Amino acid sequence: MPLKKEAATSSVILFFCFQPEGNHLLQQARKNIALNKTVLMSGGALIGNSFIEAVGNDAKGMYFIGPVRHAGPGVDQMDAVYEKNMGRRHPSVII
């Protein structure tokens, strides 16, 4: 879905979507010079390492609405079990 020229009149664009759609929307917005000063926000579905790895520097300056990652020994233990079983770190802040 291409970003329409009407989007350029918005000061904020909020998009709730998952990957890869969110990746494509962000990359389109970064290529659209009319959106240079537009604030981009996304929901919790894009808060994750895989999103940042996929879009790289395009995510800089973006805002996210979502949960805060919990910390503590229990979370550390769950992370270790996940990494052992899956062979990689958990991709999300939501555990």
Image: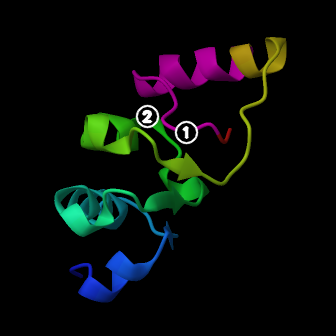
Check disc 2 and give the amino acid type: Asn
Residue count near mark 1 (Cα–Cα under 10 Å), binned few <14, some 14–19, many ≥20:
some
Magenta segment: does it hold 6? no
Marked residue nearer the N-terminal end (1 or 2): 2
Q: Residue at x 50, y 16 (%)?
A: 84
Q: Residue at x 46, y 59 (%)?
A: 40
The quadrant of the picture occupied by the C terminus is top right
- Vertical placement of residue 84 versus 90, above or below: above
Out of 2 and 17, give the one closest to the viewer: 2
Left or right placement of residue 34 versus residue 9 in this view:
left
- Judging by the rendered image, the residue that carries numbered circle 2 is 49
Left or right placement of residue 71 versus residue 41 in this view:
right
Residue 83 in picture, x, y percent from top left: 50, 20
Out of 60 and 94, give the one closest to the viewer: 60
Query: Callout 2: helix, strand or loop?
Result: helix
- Mark 1 in CB contact with mark 2 (< 8 angstroms): yes
Left or right placement of residue 71 versus residue 37 in this view:
right
Left or right placement of residue 74 versus residue 59 in this view:
right
| Number of marks | 2
Out of 81 and 18, give the one closest to the viewer: 18
- Judging by the rendered image, the residue that carries numbered circle 1 is 92
Magenta segment: does it hold 78? yes
Query: Callout 1: helix, strand or loop?
Result: loop
Q: Residue at x 31, y 65 (%)?
A: 35
Residue 43 in picture, x, y percent from top left: 58, 60
Check disc 1 and give the amino acid type: Ser
Quadrant in the picture for residue 3: bottom left
Distance of mark 1 from mark 2, alpha carbons? Answer: 6 Å
Magenta residues, start to end: 77-93
Residue count near mark 2 (Cα–Cα under 10 Å), binned few <14, some 14–19, many ≥20:
few
Give the number of the disc on residue 15.
Answer: none
